[in-house]
Image (tube, rainbow, N blue to C red):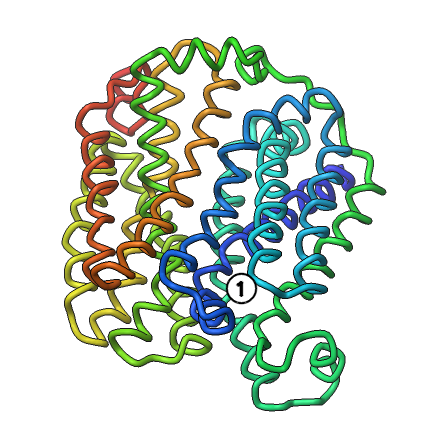
Amino acid sequence: MEKRYFLVSLIFLIFFAISFLTNILGSINPNVSDSFNLTGTMTGLLPFSFFIAYALMSIPSGMIVQRFGERKSLTGAWILAFAGSLLFSLRPVFPVFLFSLFLIGSGMAMLQVALFPLLRVTGGERHFAFNNLIVQLVFGLASFISPFVYSWLVTNLASGNKNGIFNIISGGVPEQMPWVSMYLLFVLISILLVIVVASVRFPSVTRKEDEIVGPWKTHADLFRRGVVIFFFFGIFSYVALEQGIANWISEFLRTYHGLVPETRGAATVGLFWGMMTVGCIPGLFLLRIIDSKIVLRIFTFSAFLILGITLFGNRQTALIGFPALGFCLSVMYGIIFSLALNSIERFHGSFSGILCTAIAGGAVFSLLIGKLKDMIGLRPGMLVLYIPLIYVLIVSYKAKPLIQNATIKNNINT
Protein backbone atom coordinates (compact mmCIF):
# COMPACT_ATOMS: atom_id res chain seq x y z
CA MET A 1 0.00 0.00 0.00
CA GLU A 2 2.80 2.42 0.95
CA LYS A 3 4.60 1.64 -2.32
CA ARG A 4 1.43 2.36 -4.29
CA TYR A 5 1.10 5.78 -2.65
CA PHE A 6 4.78 6.45 -3.36
CA LEU A 7 4.41 5.58 -7.06
CA VAL A 8 1.25 7.66 -7.47
CA SER A 9 2.98 10.59 -5.76
CA LEU A 10 5.96 10.14 -8.09
CA ILE A 11 3.64 10.24 -11.11
CA PHE A 12 2.09 13.47 -9.81
CA LEU A 13 5.60 14.88 -9.34
CA ILE A 14 6.47 14.02 -12.95
CA PHE A 15 3.31 15.73 -14.18
CA PHE A 16 4.28 18.77 -12.11
CA ALA A 17 7.70 18.82 -13.78
CA ILE A 18 6.16 18.44 -17.26
CA SER A 19 3.96 21.47 -16.73
CA PHE A 20 6.80 23.46 -15.11
CA LEU A 21 8.95 22.98 -18.23
CA THR A 22 6.18 23.24 -20.81
CA ASN A 23 4.46 26.49 -19.92
CA ILE A 24 7.41 28.79 -19.22
CA LEU A 25 7.68 30.06 -22.82
CA GLY A 26 4.94 32.66 -22.41
CA SER A 27 6.93 34.34 -19.65
CA ILE A 28 10.36 34.31 -21.28
CA ASN A 29 9.34 35.18 -24.86
CA PRO A 30 9.97 38.96 -24.52
CA ASN A 31 13.42 38.33 -23.03
CA VAL A 32 14.30 35.81 -25.74
CA SER A 33 13.12 38.26 -28.39
CA ASP A 34 15.31 41.02 -26.95
CA SER A 35 18.37 38.79 -26.51
CA PHE A 36 18.33 37.49 -30.07
CA ASN A 37 16.76 40.58 -31.75
CA LEU A 38 13.87 38.50 -33.07
CA THR A 39 10.98 39.54 -35.27
CA GLY A 40 7.48 38.46 -34.28
CA THR A 41 7.66 35.55 -36.73
CA MET A 42 10.96 34.34 -35.28
CA THR A 43 9.56 34.65 -31.75
CA GLY A 44 6.60 32.53 -32.88
CA LEU A 45 9.07 29.82 -33.91
CA LEU A 46 9.82 29.17 -30.22
CA PRO A 47 6.46 27.58 -29.30
CA PHE A 48 6.30 26.14 -32.84
CA SER A 49 9.54 24.19 -32.25
CA PHE A 50 8.21 22.88 -28.94
CA PHE A 51 4.67 21.93 -29.89
CA ILE A 52 5.45 20.55 -33.34
CA ALA A 53 7.24 17.79 -31.40
CA TYR A 54 3.83 16.69 -30.10
CA ALA A 55 2.54 16.43 -33.68
CA LEU A 56 5.50 14.30 -34.76
CA MET A 57 6.04 12.24 -31.60
CA SER A 58 2.63 11.50 -30.01
CA ILE A 59 1.72 8.46 -32.12
CA PRO A 60 5.27 7.03 -32.33
CA SER A 61 5.61 7.53 -28.56
CA GLY A 62 2.60 5.27 -27.96
CA MET A 63 4.27 2.56 -30.02
CA ILE A 64 7.59 3.07 -28.21
CA VAL A 65 5.97 2.76 -24.79
CA GLN A 66 4.18 -0.45 -25.78
CA ARG A 67 7.44 -1.87 -27.18
CA PHE A 68 9.89 -0.94 -24.40
CA GLY A 69 7.68 -0.45 -21.35
CA GLU A 70 6.98 2.48 -19.07
CA ARG A 71 10.23 2.74 -17.07
CA LYS A 72 12.54 2.72 -20.10
CA SER A 73 10.27 5.14 -21.94
CA LEU A 74 10.05 7.54 -18.99
CA THR A 75 13.82 7.41 -18.55
CA GLY A 76 14.38 8.02 -22.26
CA ALA A 77 11.95 10.94 -22.23
CA TRP A 78 13.78 12.66 -19.37
CA ILE A 79 17.11 12.04 -21.10
CA LEU A 80 15.72 13.92 -24.11
CA ALA A 81 14.62 16.80 -21.85
CA PHE A 82 18.02 16.78 -20.13
CA ALA A 83 19.87 16.81 -23.45
CA GLY A 84 17.78 19.69 -24.79
CA SER A 85 18.19 21.79 -21.65
CA LEU A 86 21.92 21.10 -21.35
CA LEU A 87 22.58 21.77 -25.02
CA PHE A 88 21.08 25.25 -24.85
CA SER A 89 22.67 26.02 -21.48
CA LEU A 90 26.09 25.29 -22.98
CA ARG A 91 25.41 27.03 -26.31
CA PRO A 92 22.77 29.77 -25.81
CA VAL A 93 22.19 30.84 -29.42
CA PHE A 94 18.90 31.02 -31.30
CA PRO A 95 19.23 28.00 -33.69
CA VAL A 96 20.35 25.79 -30.80
CA PHE A 97 17.42 27.04 -28.72
CA LEU A 98 14.95 25.96 -31.41
CA PHE A 99 16.48 22.47 -31.58
CA SER A 100 16.59 22.26 -27.78
CA LEU A 101 12.89 23.12 -27.55
CA PHE A 102 12.12 20.34 -30.04
CA LEU A 103 14.08 17.82 -27.95
CA ILE A 104 12.33 18.92 -24.74
CA GLY A 105 8.92 18.83 -26.47
CA SER A 106 9.60 15.30 -27.75
CA GLY A 107 10.40 14.18 -24.22
CA MET A 108 7.25 15.79 -22.83
CA ALA A 109 5.09 14.12 -25.51
CA MET A 110 6.49 10.69 -24.65
CA LEU A 111 6.00 11.30 -20.93
CA GLN A 112 2.32 12.14 -21.29
CA VAL A 113 1.66 9.10 -23.48
CA ALA A 114 3.30 6.80 -20.92
CA LEU A 115 1.95 8.29 -17.70
CA PHE A 116 -1.84 8.05 -18.02
CA PRO A 117 -2.03 4.22 -18.42
CA LEU A 118 0.57 3.92 -15.66
CA LEU A 119 -1.53 6.11 -13.37
CA ARG A 120 -4.60 3.95 -14.04
CA VAL A 121 -2.76 0.78 -13.05
CA THR A 122 -0.73 2.21 -10.15
CA GLY A 123 -3.55 4.18 -8.55
CA GLY A 124 -6.27 1.65 -9.34
CA GLU A 125 -9.06 1.87 -11.90
CA ARG A 126 -11.64 2.91 -9.31
CA HIS A 127 -9.55 5.94 -8.38
CA PHE A 128 -8.51 6.86 -11.93
CA ALA A 129 -11.05 9.67 -12.41
CA PHE A 130 -10.12 11.20 -9.04
CA ASN A 131 -6.39 10.90 -9.72
CA ASN A 132 -6.92 12.40 -13.17
CA LEU A 133 -8.47 15.45 -11.54
CA ILE A 134 -5.46 15.76 -9.24
CA VAL A 135 -3.24 15.65 -12.33
CA GLN A 136 -5.10 18.65 -13.76
CA LEU A 137 -4.70 20.52 -10.47
CA VAL A 138 -0.98 19.65 -10.32
CA PHE A 139 -0.58 20.79 -13.92
CA GLY A 140 -2.22 24.11 -13.15
CA LEU A 141 -0.22 24.60 -9.96
CA ALA A 142 3.10 24.06 -11.76
CA SER A 143 2.10 26.41 -14.60
CA PHE A 144 1.16 29.02 -12.01
CA ILE A 145 4.42 28.67 -10.07
CA SER A 146 6.95 28.53 -12.94
CA PRO A 147 6.57 32.21 -14.06
CA PHE A 148 7.18 33.35 -10.47
CA VAL A 149 10.30 31.16 -10.20
CA TYR A 150 11.49 32.70 -13.48
CA SER A 151 10.81 36.21 -12.15
CA TRP A 152 12.68 35.42 -8.92
CA LEU A 153 15.73 34.07 -10.77
CA VAL A 154 15.93 36.79 -13.40
CA THR A 155 15.37 39.79 -11.14
CA ASN A 156 18.02 38.58 -8.68
CA LEU A 157 20.56 37.86 -11.40
CA ALA A 158 19.85 41.12 -13.20
CA SER A 159 20.31 43.08 -9.98
CA GLY A 160 23.77 41.55 -9.50
CA ASN A 161 22.87 39.40 -6.48
CA LYS A 162 25.92 37.17 -5.77
CA ASN A 163 24.66 35.54 -2.60
CA GLY A 164 24.38 31.76 -2.24
CA ILE A 165 22.88 29.99 -5.22
CA PHE A 166 22.94 33.12 -7.38
CA ASN A 167 26.74 33.19 -7.20
CA ILE A 168 26.80 29.68 -8.68
CA ILE A 169 24.15 30.37 -11.32
CA SER A 170 25.64 33.68 -12.45
CA GLY A 171 28.80 31.89 -13.55
CA GLY A 172 26.83 29.63 -15.86
CA VAL A 173 24.69 32.14 -17.77
CA PRO A 174 25.57 35.06 -20.07
CA GLU A 175 25.46 38.37 -18.18
CA GLN A 176 22.90 39.89 -20.55
CA MET A 177 20.75 36.75 -20.70
CA PRO A 178 19.75 35.90 -17.10
CA TRP A 179 16.65 34.08 -18.38
CA VAL A 180 18.94 31.22 -19.51
CA SER A 181 19.11 30.32 -15.81
CA MET A 182 15.70 28.62 -16.21
CA TYR A 183 17.29 26.07 -18.51
CA LEU A 184 20.03 25.38 -15.98
CA LEU A 185 17.20 24.65 -13.56
CA PHE A 186 15.61 22.37 -16.18
CA VAL A 187 18.94 20.51 -16.49
CA LEU A 188 18.88 19.84 -12.74
CA ILE A 189 15.21 18.77 -12.73
CA SER A 190 15.71 16.44 -15.69
CA ILE A 191 18.81 14.69 -14.39
CA LEU A 192 17.21 14.16 -10.98
CA LEU A 193 14.14 12.58 -12.58
CA VAL A 194 16.31 10.41 -14.86
CA ILE A 195 17.98 9.02 -11.73
CA VAL A 196 14.72 8.58 -9.80
CA VAL A 197 12.73 6.99 -12.64
CA ALA A 198 15.56 4.65 -13.63
CA SER A 199 15.81 3.36 -10.05
CA VAL A 200 12.11 2.74 -9.42
CA ARG A 201 10.25 -0.46 -10.24
CA PHE A 202 6.91 0.34 -11.85
CA PRO A 203 4.08 -2.21 -12.17
CA SER A 204 3.56 -3.74 -15.60
CA VAL A 205 0.74 -2.11 -17.53
CA THR A 206 -1.75 -4.37 -19.25
CA ARG A 207 -3.67 -2.17 -21.62
CA LYS A 208 -7.35 -2.69 -22.24
CA GLU A 209 -8.30 -3.47 -25.83
CA ASP A 210 -9.38 0.11 -26.54
CA GLU A 211 -6.18 1.53 -24.97
CA ILE A 212 -3.82 -0.33 -27.32
CA VAL A 213 -2.15 1.91 -29.89
CA GLY A 214 -2.74 0.24 -33.23
CA PRO A 215 -0.49 0.14 -36.30
CA TRP A 216 -0.17 3.01 -38.78
CA LYS A 217 -2.97 1.49 -40.89
CA THR A 218 -5.41 1.87 -37.99
CA HIS A 219 -4.53 5.56 -37.68
CA ALA A 220 -4.90 6.06 -41.43
CA ASP A 221 -8.31 4.36 -41.39
CA LEU A 222 -9.45 6.55 -38.50
CA PHE A 223 -8.37 9.70 -40.34
CA ARG A 224 -10.79 8.80 -43.12
CA ARG A 225 -13.70 9.21 -40.69
CA GLY A 226 -15.33 12.61 -40.54
CA VAL A 227 -15.88 12.45 -36.78
CA VAL A 228 -12.14 11.92 -36.20
CA ILE A 229 -11.19 14.90 -38.36
CA PHE A 230 -13.89 17.00 -36.67
CA PHE A 231 -12.49 16.38 -33.18
CA PHE A 232 -8.87 16.55 -34.35
CA PHE A 233 -9.51 20.20 -35.23
CA GLY A 234 -11.42 20.62 -31.97
CA ILE A 235 -8.29 19.81 -29.94
CA PHE A 236 -6.17 21.71 -32.47
CA SER A 237 -8.35 24.79 -31.91
CA TYR A 238 -8.29 24.54 -28.13
CA VAL A 239 -4.49 24.31 -27.93
CA ALA A 240 -4.23 27.13 -30.49
CA LEU A 241 -6.28 29.28 -28.11
CA GLU A 242 -4.39 28.27 -24.97
CA GLN A 243 -0.91 28.76 -26.37
CA GLY A 244 -1.84 31.68 -28.61
CA ILE A 245 -2.92 33.58 -25.51
CA ALA A 246 -0.29 32.34 -23.03
CA ASN A 247 2.70 32.84 -25.31
CA TRP A 248 1.84 36.47 -26.11
CA ILE A 249 0.46 37.80 -22.79
CA SER A 250 3.75 39.21 -21.56
CA GLU A 251 4.67 40.78 -24.91
CA PHE A 252 1.18 42.28 -25.25
CA LEU A 253 1.39 43.88 -21.80
CA ARG A 254 4.82 45.31 -22.60
CA THR A 255 3.86 46.59 -26.06
CA TYR A 256 0.53 48.24 -25.22
CA HIS A 257 0.71 48.93 -21.48
CA GLY A 258 4.43 49.34 -20.77
CA LEU A 259 4.61 46.57 -18.16
CA VAL A 260 7.91 44.86 -17.38
CA PRO A 261 7.94 41.22 -18.66
CA GLU A 262 10.09 39.90 -15.81
CA THR A 263 7.62 41.02 -13.12
CA ARG A 264 4.09 42.07 -14.08
CA GLY A 265 4.18 40.14 -17.35
CA ALA A 266 5.33 36.92 -15.69
CA ALA A 267 2.84 37.37 -12.85
CA THR A 268 -0.06 37.75 -15.30
CA VAL A 269 1.03 34.63 -17.18
CA GLY A 270 1.10 32.79 -13.85
CA LEU A 271 -2.39 34.03 -13.00
CA PHE A 272 -3.64 32.91 -16.43
CA TRP A 273 -2.57 29.35 -15.63
CA GLY A 274 -3.73 29.65 -12.04
CA MET A 275 -7.23 30.65 -13.11
CA MET A 276 -7.34 27.68 -15.47
CA THR A 277 -6.99 25.53 -12.37
CA VAL A 278 -9.59 27.52 -10.42
CA GLY A 279 -12.04 27.25 -13.32
CA CYS A 280 -12.03 23.46 -13.05
CA ILE A 281 -13.96 23.65 -9.77
CA PRO A 282 -17.20 25.32 -11.02
CA GLY A 283 -16.72 23.39 -14.26
CA LEU A 284 -16.91 20.08 -12.39
CA PHE A 285 -20.02 21.24 -10.55
CA LEU A 286 -21.75 22.31 -13.78
CA LEU A 287 -20.92 18.98 -15.44
CA ARG A 288 -22.86 17.23 -12.69
CA ILE A 289 -26.06 19.17 -13.43
CA ILE A 290 -26.06 19.97 -17.19
CA ASP A 291 -24.85 18.46 -20.45
CA SER A 292 -21.14 18.92 -21.20
CA LYS A 293 -21.89 20.58 -24.57
CA ILE A 294 -23.88 23.30 -22.78
CA VAL A 295 -21.03 23.83 -20.29
CA LEU A 296 -18.60 24.15 -23.19
CA ARG A 297 -20.93 26.66 -24.87
CA ILE A 298 -21.23 28.83 -21.74
CA PHE A 299 -17.47 29.05 -21.22
CA THR A 300 -16.83 29.64 -24.94
CA PHE A 301 -19.33 32.51 -25.20
CA SER A 302 -17.72 34.04 -22.11
CA ALA A 303 -14.29 33.81 -23.77
CA PHE A 304 -15.69 35.53 -26.88
CA LEU A 305 -16.66 38.57 -24.84
CA ILE A 306 -13.63 38.68 -22.55
CA LEU A 307 -11.07 38.32 -25.37
CA GLY A 308 -12.32 41.48 -27.09
CA ILE A 309 -12.46 43.48 -23.86
CA THR A 310 -8.95 42.33 -22.93
CA LEU A 311 -7.38 43.21 -26.25
CA PHE A 312 -8.99 46.66 -26.58
CA GLY A 313 -9.42 47.74 -22.95
CA ASN A 314 -7.06 49.67 -20.69
CA ARG A 315 -4.16 48.32 -18.61
CA GLN A 316 -6.29 47.19 -15.67
CA THR A 317 -8.74 45.49 -18.00
CA ALA A 318 -5.90 43.53 -19.59
CA LEU A 319 -4.46 42.52 -16.21
CA ILE A 320 -7.86 41.14 -15.21
CA GLY A 321 -8.88 39.91 -18.64
CA PHE A 322 -6.01 37.53 -19.37
CA PRO A 323 -6.49 35.53 -16.13
CA ALA A 324 -10.25 35.58 -16.81
CA LEU A 325 -9.56 33.99 -20.19
CA GLY A 326 -7.69 31.24 -18.37
CA PHE A 327 -10.83 30.63 -16.31
CA CYS A 328 -12.91 30.38 -19.52
CA LEU A 329 -10.51 27.92 -21.14
CA SER A 330 -10.36 25.67 -18.06
CA VAL A 331 -13.05 23.17 -19.10
CA MET A 332 -12.51 23.15 -22.86
CA TYR A 333 -9.77 20.54 -23.28
CA GLY A 334 -11.34 17.95 -20.99
CA ILE A 335 -14.82 18.33 -22.49
CA ILE A 336 -13.65 18.24 -26.13
CA PHE A 337 -11.43 15.20 -25.44
CA SER A 338 -14.22 13.30 -23.68
CA LEU A 339 -16.76 14.19 -26.38
CA ALA A 340 -14.30 12.88 -28.96
CA LEU A 341 -13.62 9.53 -27.28
CA ASN A 342 -17.34 9.07 -26.58
CA SER A 343 -18.12 9.59 -30.27
CA ILE A 344 -16.49 6.39 -31.60
CA GLU A 345 -17.08 2.78 -30.64
CA ARG A 346 -13.47 1.43 -30.61
CA PHE A 347 -9.80 2.18 -31.27
CA HIS A 348 -9.72 4.71 -28.44
CA GLY A 349 -5.97 4.24 -27.91
CA SER A 350 -5.17 5.13 -31.51
CA PHE A 351 -7.73 7.97 -31.47
CA SER A 352 -6.10 9.39 -28.33
CA GLY A 353 -2.77 9.45 -30.16
CA ILE A 354 -4.37 11.34 -33.04
CA LEU A 355 -5.91 13.84 -30.61
CA CYS A 356 -2.54 14.36 -28.91
CA THR A 357 -1.05 15.04 -32.35
CA ALA A 358 -3.54 17.90 -32.64
CA ILE A 359 -1.61 19.69 -29.89
CA ALA A 360 0.30 21.06 -32.90
CA GLY A 361 -2.36 23.79 -32.88
CA GLY A 362 -0.22 25.50 -30.25
CA ALA A 363 2.67 25.55 -32.71
CA VAL A 364 0.72 26.83 -35.71
CA PHE A 365 -1.21 29.68 -34.10
CA SER A 366 1.65 31.00 -31.99
CA LEU A 367 3.70 31.25 -35.17
CA LEU A 368 0.79 32.81 -37.08
CA ILE A 369 0.31 35.49 -34.41
CA GLY A 370 4.03 36.27 -34.59
CA LYS A 371 3.81 36.69 -38.37
CA LEU A 372 0.76 38.93 -38.07
CA LYS A 373 2.56 40.97 -35.39
CA ASP A 374 5.21 41.84 -37.97
CA MET A 375 2.61 42.66 -40.60
CA ILE A 376 -0.20 44.50 -38.79
CA GLY A 377 0.71 44.61 -35.08
CA LEU A 378 0.20 42.27 -32.13
CA ARG A 379 -3.27 43.50 -31.07
CA PRO A 380 -4.95 42.98 -34.47
CA GLY A 381 -2.84 39.84 -34.95
CA MET A 382 -4.30 38.27 -31.81
CA LEU A 383 -7.79 38.70 -33.25
CA VAL A 384 -7.00 35.57 -35.27
CA LEU A 385 -7.74 33.70 -32.02
CA TYR A 386 -11.43 34.15 -32.79
CA ILE A 387 -11.05 31.51 -35.54
CA PRO A 388 -10.29 28.60 -33.16
CA LEU A 389 -12.76 30.06 -30.66
CA ILE A 390 -15.52 29.86 -33.29
CA TYR A 391 -14.54 26.25 -34.02
CA VAL A 392 -14.79 25.31 -30.34
CA LEU A 393 -18.25 26.89 -30.32
CA ILE A 394 -19.19 24.77 -33.35
CA VAL A 395 -18.07 21.66 -31.45
CA SER A 396 -20.40 22.62 -28.60
CA TYR A 397 -23.35 22.56 -31.03
CA LYS A 398 -22.42 19.83 -33.55
CA ALA A 399 -20.87 17.10 -31.37
CA LYS A 400 -23.02 13.95 -31.20
CA PRO A 401 -21.46 11.65 -28.61
CA LEU A 402 -22.67 8.08 -28.34
CA ILE A 403 -22.48 8.44 -24.55
CA GLN A 404 -23.46 11.62 -22.71
CA ASN A 405 -21.80 12.79 -19.52
CA ALA A 406 -23.47 11.62 -16.33
CA THR A 407 -25.56 14.31 -14.61
CA ILE A 408 -27.73 14.18 -11.51
CA LYS A 409 -30.84 14.28 -13.71
CA ASN A 410 -29.98 11.40 -16.05
CA ASN A 411 -28.63 9.36 -13.12
CA ILE A 412 -32.06 9.65 -11.48
CA ASN A 413 -33.81 8.72 -14.74
CA THR A 414 -31.68 5.61 -15.11
Q: Is residue 395 above or below residue 80?
A: above
In what quadrant of the picture does the C terminus appear? top left
Query: In the rendered picture of this protein, how many numbered marks are placed on residues?
Result: 1
| The N terminus - image quarter | top right
Q: Residue at (21%, 42%) from the top-left corner?
A: 387
Look at 70% across and 23% down and name the residue there.
205
Residue hosting label 1: 146
**Residue 44 shown left or right of residue 126 in the figure:** left
Residue type of the residue flagged with mark 1: Ser
Tell me: residue 202, above or below residue 193. above
* Position of residue 342 measured from the top left corner of the image (x, y, whole percent): 37, 19
- Considering every residue shown, the one lying at the far right of the view is 199
Residue pictured at 34% horizontal, 46% vertical: 365
Q: Is residue 163 left or right of residue 279?
A: right
Which residue: 53% across, 13% down?
Answer: 210
Picture quadrant where residue 261 is located: bottom left
Residue 223: % across, % down: 39, 15
Rendering coords of residue 332 (x, y %) = 32, 40
| Quadrant in the rendering for residue 164 | bottom right
Which sits in the foreground, 116 or 121? 116
Secondary structure under tag 1 reads helix
Relative to 380, is 313 above or below? below
Residue 144 lies, in percent from the top left, at 47, 62
